Amino acid sequence: MDISSEMIHGLLPVFLIGTLGASAFMVGLIEGAGEATALLVKVFSGALSDWWGKRKPLAVFGYGLGALSKPLFALAPTAGFVLAARLTDRVGKGIRGAPRDALVADIAPADVRGAAFGLRQALDTIGAFLGPLLGIGLMLLWANDFRAVFWVAIIPGLLAVALLFLGVQEPEKPRGARRINPISRESLRRLPTTYWWVVGIGAAFTLARFSEAFLVLRAAQVGLPVAFAPLVLVGMNVVYSLSAYPFGKLSDHVSHAKLLSWGLVALIGADLALAWSSHWSWVWCGISLWGLHMGMTQGLLARMVADGAPPELRGSAYGFFNLISGLALLVASAIAGLLWDQFGAAQTFVAGAVFSTLALLLILFRRREPQQ
């Protein structure tokens, strides 16, 4: 599915601005609204998977909706139509996201859960750089025909649905288990303080890291040809993929707070490199550090949510975590777009470094770290 999504995502900012005449603020709004929608839907899909006791059917439906949304990008005549397509795609992501993460947590042994989530992130990210590479090849083959590339993206999406449907088995729910309302006040009280701390720090991370669409726009400023715009996501995701599993495995043995802190240091370095100069060497340094930050932190945060929530409430726990992060992403991407339009790229990434520093201080000044 990431091959399918990133074939479009890697080209979408340039398509919006160069073909449809959208502003950077509109790009930020579309990206932020899309991701926020996905994360909002995760609350309800996660809670439903807890109540139902089944994760896989919701995941299959969500992946299917994501695959079927791809032709809408090819048909889009305006930025508003792209927004509708993006929202449809992200609703599919929202439906599948929390049940899928809860399914990983249900299947993985607790003592290697960090490695399991790191491996999932790594494999996820392999698709995230194969997709842009395929997009580049097709753009060169078809003389920058965005819409033709968008049509092809439906094929790997449908293959993902078939693979999930035929190849994944979920654990059976014990017979006679009582169904509970996972979003009742009583159930929410069962989520410990440690879990809510993870929710808060996840939101702080998201405020510090706006949409990767702005990495694509920054690279375009240094003269990267339109057909090669997806190379930005390729470069970032190669680093992300190579680092996700080692750092996920490391999280099974070291302090989570320390690993999160170093991840934020990497993000601060990325923002400062991208703000310092528009020379290609600084831009690619920033993109690489951005990917390293993702590899160090994303699987770790997913593992921390699983550790902090009771097994029967994991779907809801992922849902609430992603809801708060989604609202933060909407705010961050909108602010980034406004700063870009009003003050330029450098100030946008300086603001990202400031938010990253605040998130780092939040971790450093916390007296107790969460469960390792």
Image (spheres, rainbow, N blue to C red):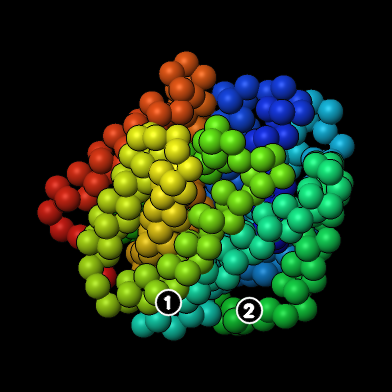
- The reply to whether residue 307 is visible in this rendering is yes
Q: Where is residue 290 shown, x and y percent of the image?
A: 42, 51
- Nearer to the camera, 197 or 90: 90
Picture quarter with the N terminus: bottom right
> Looking at the picture, which amino acid does disc 1 mark?
Ala
Q: Where is residue 291 shown, x and y percent of the image?
A: 45, 56
Q: Is residue 133 above or below residue 168?
A: above
The residue positioned 76% from the left and 56% from the top of the image is 137
Say whether residue 235 is left or right of residue 229: left
- Nearer to the camera, 218 or 2: 218
The residue positioned 44% from the left and 73% from the top of the image is 245
> What number is the disc on residue 170?
2
Residue at numbered disc 1: 115
Picture quarter with the C terminus: bottom left
> Looking at the picture, which amino acid does disc 2 mark?
Glu
**Secondary-structure class at tag 1:** helix
Q: Is residue 31 above or below residue 155?
A: above
